[in-house]
Image (cartoon, coloured by chain):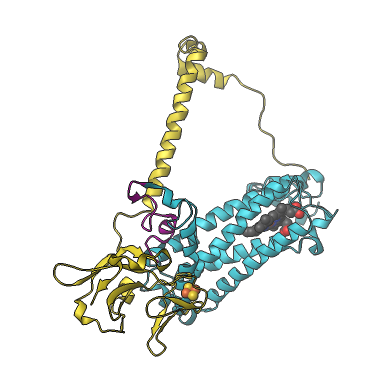
Chain colours: A yellow, B cyan
Amino acid sequence: MTDSRQSPPTSPTAAPTRRAENILGAEGLSGLRGKTSRRGFFPWLGLAWVSITAGFAMLAGVSLRFLFPNVLFEPPSTFKAGFPSEYEVGAVDERFKSKFGVWIVRDEATLFALSTICTHLGCTPNWLGGEQKFKCPCHGSGFYIDGMNFEGPAPRPLERYKIYVADDGQVVVDKNSKYQWEKGQWDNPESFVSMA
Amino acid sequence: MSRLANVKKSIARSQLWTAFFRHGYPDTDRNRVLVIMSNVLLHLHPVKVRKSGVKMKYTWCAGGLSFFLFLLETITGLLLMFYYRPTIEYAYVDIIDLREQVPLGIMRELHRWGAHAMVIAVWVHMFRVFMTGSYKPPREFNWNVGVILLVLTLLLSFTGYLLPWDQLAIWAITVGSNMARATPFLGHEGPGAALLRVGDVSLVHIGDDVRFALLGGRFVGAGTLLRFYVLHCVAIPLIAGFGMAIHFWRVRKDGGISGPL
Ligand code: HEM
Ligand code: FES
């Protein structure tokens, strides 16, 4: 069987050229000649490319910025945590764990805020009162009550957050500043409230 | 001429028939080429294939299997989308319902097992391309297209992992996305990020780094679920489909599937 389709006519006709003449007026293409020189054309071409590139760069920038919302519906990073007298020596306070990701721990001399983010890969450990340790369910890291790591893959102790007593006498935890043991920052007076 | 032959002839000449079949039977070399060239889907495929190219022994059909599994995932995934809602109230219960309250409760299992199988198939395909030396010129470009497809396959796997919104999902994505903290310059704990600061204000911090853009928040939450859903169901499959079109076209342009040495 042969191809049942005919190839379209390929011979050029006069019609397209005549239409171009109509658009450009009586002089046709030659009417454009002399108005813009070859050299004069290139600055315009350059400008056109620069504008288009700038336009697209702006669109890309706007799209990128779109990924960062102006408002976050997350709990605030600073919160009040009651009065220092509410905390018992040797207890781990879990009231702020699920909402703010913070344990507040009281030892003899100080009150401090421990981050609940495991320093291995970021899971949330559990406080096991009977064994007196924080135990991470993900890969088994263990931390003592003061946050020191002692078992499992976690390479460093839990981090502590800024904690202070506000003018109204309430404890405030500010998660915007953190204090790392390995950097010697636990000595910083901002990282604990003195209970002495 | 018999009546049957006449009917056959008039059908073959009808407008409907010729609109679909724009060439004669593929019994000449010319028509065989036309079959491939005049069809947008087939034209990604080479007109001629080397004998070794269709041997299981040579390709293990691992690339073809990867593509088949991608199609399977597309279809089963589309069906799952009719039930699944990507919010923290509904995601988990919708997944349970998909198993228990929907006819053919194995659709979700098909999608999940298919996903595992696709990851395996893609690695096997890469291994075979390596072992047959098919990454060598002129196919080095297609090897790189392949590497991009591999990354996209893994990203599909990663984003899909979060969607059931169970403990495994949440913590796996927490752990996985924490790696993004260490991205050079773009992650707030990565090398170089500390250099990007104006006076006391750091430009790259937990609220604006690349991990934040991925999660839509400071930690894995409602925003993350929605972002991963959109990436998993729309963005990555589109990019991967586009990449596969290039991949298959390149196989054709590089002279078809390579032959044994
Ligand atoms: C989504 C993932 C992928 C799909 C669907 C896919 C699909 C295919 C298909 C159907 C072929 C034809 C030959 C065959 O079936 O083996 C092929 C060839 C090829 N693929 Fe892939 N591929 C994928 C990923 C990759 C990866 C990860 C690599 C390597 C980094 C790669 C490199 C190549 C190369 C170099 C060829 C040409 C092989 C030859 O000519 O012998 N592809 N691919
Ligand atoms: S994340 Fe805690 S042990 Fe790995």
Would you say residue A117 sits in the magenta stretch?
Answer: no
> Which one is nearer the viewer's eye here, A166 or A10?
A166
Q: What residue lies at 47% left-to-right and 56% top-to-bottom?
A: B190
Q: Examine the rendering and report whether any part of residue B78 can be seen.
A: no
State how many labels appear: 0
Q: Is residue B200 magenta?
A: yes
Give the answer, above or below, for where A157 lies relative to B261: below
Question: Where residue A169 appears, x then y in whole percent?
Answer: 15, 72
Taking the spot 36% from the left edge, 54% from the top edge, the residue there is A68
* Residue A144 seen in this snapshot: yes
* Left or right placement of residue A188 versus residue A28 in this view: left
Q: Is residue B222 left or right of residue B35?
A: left
Please state the quadrant of the image where ligand 1 appears.
bottom right
Percent position (x, y) of residue A38? 52, 14
Residue farthest toward the bottom in the current orientation of the protein: A130
Residue B57, picture quadrant:
bottom right
Toward the viewer: B94 or B146? Answer: B146
Q: In which quarter of the image is residue A62?
A: top left
- Percent across and percent down for residue B69 are 63, 65
Above or below, A163 relative to A52? below
The span shown in magenta is B198-219
Q: Which of A185 and B51 is in front in this view?
A: A185
Q: Is residue B227 left or right of residue B120?
A: left
Pinpoint residue B48: horizontal percent, then vertical percent. Answer: 79, 49
Q: Which quadrant of the view contains residue B82? A: bottom left
For residue B167, side relative to residue B260 (left or right)? left
